[in-house]
Image: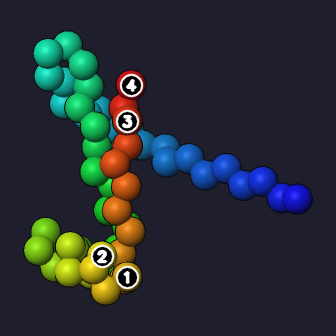
Amino acid sequence: MALLHRQVVTAFEPAERYGARQPVLLVESSGPAPLSELFDRFGRGEAGIAVLNTE
């Protein structure tokens, strides 16, 4: 059995609110696009979306 582990590495510092870092929305898509187009791509299965806990 093969186990895979993927990790996003970035220097991005998420905003803080009430002393805690806010979650980050990660969108995986080919090329830049307006937010509405990114959600349309997700609906068509052409993009991925993940909410990351930043704590």
Any mark on residue 45, and which?
1
Residue 11 position in % (x across, y down): 38, 38
| Cα gap from disc 4 to disc 3, whole angstroms | 6 Å
- Callout 4: few (<14), some (14-19), or many (20+) C-alpha neighbours within 10 Å? few
Relative to 19, residue 12 above or below: below
Residue 48 visible: yes
| Residue at figure coordinates x 29%, y 32% from the top left | 13
Query: Mark 1 falls on what kind of element?
Result: loop
Q: Tell me the kind of residue under disc 4.
A: Glu
- Callout 1: few (<14), some (14-19), or many (20+) C-alpha neighbours within 10 Å? few
Residue at mark 2: 42
View extreme (bottom): residue = 44
Q: Tell me the kind of residue under disc 3.
A: Asn
| Cα gap from disc 3 to disc 2, whole angstroms | 20 Å
Mark positioned earlier in the residue sequence (4 or 1):
1
| Cα gap from disc 1 to disc 3, whole angstroms | 23 Å
Q: Tell me the kind of residue under disc 2.
A: Phe
Pointers 4 and 2 in contact (C-beta within 8 Å): no
Pointers 1 and 2 in contact (C-beta within 8 Å): yes
Residue at mark 3: 53
Residue at mark 4: 55
